[in-house]
Amino acid sequence: MQGDRRQIQTAVLGGADSEDPLMLPLEAIELDAFRRHHEHDTFWCGLLLGGCGLQLTTKLYTDRVCHFAHYPGPDGHPHVCGRRARGVNSADHLYVKSEAAAWLRNRGLQADFEFTQPEGAPVGSVVDIQFQHGGLRVHLDQAVQPAWDQDGLEPVLGMSVPVERDTLIDRWYVHRIRLNSEGTSRKVQIGTEAFAREPEWFALDDCEMTERGLSTPAVERIVRARSTRPPSRWPTGKVKKVPGTEARAQVVLRRLADALKVESVVVVNRVLGEIAAVTGVSQQTQAELDTAVAGANRWLEGQAEVRRDLFARLDEAVAARRTKQIRELLARVNATASHDRTDTEDVIAAAAADYMTAFTSEAYERVRGILDGLSRTGRHLQPAQMRPLVEKAIQAAADAGSLTGDREAIQIAYWKERAGLNQPTSPSPARPARAAPAGDQQQPRRRNLHKQVARRYWIKRSCPRCHAGQGHNCVIDNQTSTGEVRNVPHDERLQPILEERKAKQQQQTPPPSPWRVYDVTCPDCSQGPDARCESPGGPHRSRVELAKEYSRLRKPPPKR
């Protein structure tokens, strides 16, 4: 399949102004079920997707990805639409609004949503969520620079939006957002990223809105750790007394040392400004401050030289098209030199980012092309013939990076197994058993349900997992569209039959007779069955309730 990145994968339901997004399945076998589910719906090239507002139809292909398409014009020629974003993530701003609104309703909160376009950004780059006292600004791409000091709007960054190290140090943490494909929808996850730590990811339901803003379980741990006061270094009654100005000088000196330790240019400059405002200290303390400032200025000069060298090396790497070096240097530039860039630095960084975008897109197209070729001819190839193609797909997937999704990963794992690339290199005297294809390793194997249901029963039903229709065997769920038949049906096809049998048996079995009060031993007075309680008012209440509970549990009573 030729990976055409321009094909439309998302639409909205019901009309051009709709905010109800959906994503089209890529494979023909999935599109059939999608069409049945939406047989009474209409699909539109939504205005909030940057589209033309005209109606769409679905296109089913077996030799390339399925996609939405415009109806032809009155003259029969293809309709020309200027919509720029067409991939699976092109409706993410609508999914963010839908999930966030439901999340807030469950917490009794209300908010206004707006797809703002600051600085002329395309629709969908930014989602503003406004509360009565504050709000969130979700940056889904790099079109708009996050404003960390803007009142009332806390930035939440998409995966492609860089954040400088100094910001992480100064703010303690930042939030990120990502959306994962689930069927024909996208699900939101929130990540909390701190300095020198990978983001911790949480479902939206695990997050809360607090006085600090958006909060996750990771935020609570970070705030507790930063808010805990260190133990006193002086015994009780022997607290060291320091004059106010002297104490302030010692505090800024420690802060400067900490900033130099973590190599934070922004914080070093800020602390130097605070040191300049310190006056009225002793001659000895002033000497300490002067020495610290001189050392910090020398360090800043060195960092400026390192920065100039970093951008020069990045510029040279782009000119020479050295991809690996560009990837490494661009990551360093975004992490350490994203603040106060000159025009020249902006041009160099933008050129590097454009190069990597083009490189990863080309690599993704190679992945899709190789996997499509394998889905058509792979079953007829020997492992030795298949191996070079699979190795090329693995390398292309590594080059494509985050563009390679779960679907491609499942397919690559399947073809690696078929090509024998998962086997040990040393010969084994015993032939290893053939492992199940990667697509059928997504769930642990349960008990052998296929031995409990005869074929004549399950063949009359369709399979909810691989969508095999009535009268057809299940196929291997590896997303390669090879149609390779499984030896046994999927458990998801058999489980409903077994559950129906169990329910029918329970209906046919007569319920046991209810328990009488004097069938049980009294919990209060310990009188056994058939012995009356010692209370003058009849059986104790606890004995009555126990008999009712045994009856509710359908527990067989003792023989009378």
Image (cartoon, rainbow, N blue to C red):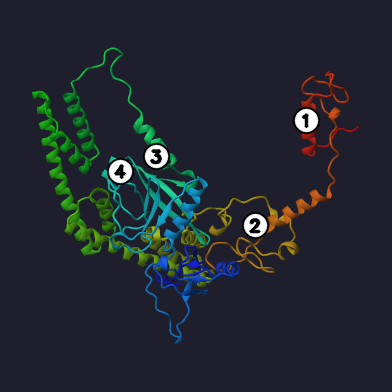
Which mark is on residue 168?
4
Question: Nearer the observer, disc 2 or disc 3?
Answer: 3
In the current view of this chain or complex, which residue is farthest to the bottom? Answer: 75
Q: Which residue position holds label 3?
A: 211
> For the C terminus, which image quadrant?
top right
| Label 2, label 3: how far apart the Cα atoms are | 46 Å
Q: Which residue position holds label 1?
A: 546
Please indicate, yes or no, whether residue 556 appears anywhere in the rendered image: yes
Crowd around label 3: few <14 · some 14–19 · many ≥20 (10 Å)? few
Residue type for callout 1: Leu
Question: Nearer the observer, disc 4 or disc 1?
Answer: 1
Q: Which residue position holds label 2?
A: 492
Question: Nearer the observer, disc 1 or disc 2?
Answer: 1
**Circles 4, 3 touching at the beta carbon (< 8 Å):** no
Residue type for callout 4: Leu
In the current view of this chain or complex, which residue is farthest to the front? Answer: 132
Residue at the spot x=58%, y=55% of the render? Answer: 433
Q: Circle 3 — which element?
A: loop
Q: Position of residue 450 (x, y in %)?
A: 70, 57
Residue at the spot x=11%, y=26% of the render? Answer: 280
Question: In the picture shown, does residue 81 fall above or below 204?
Answer: below
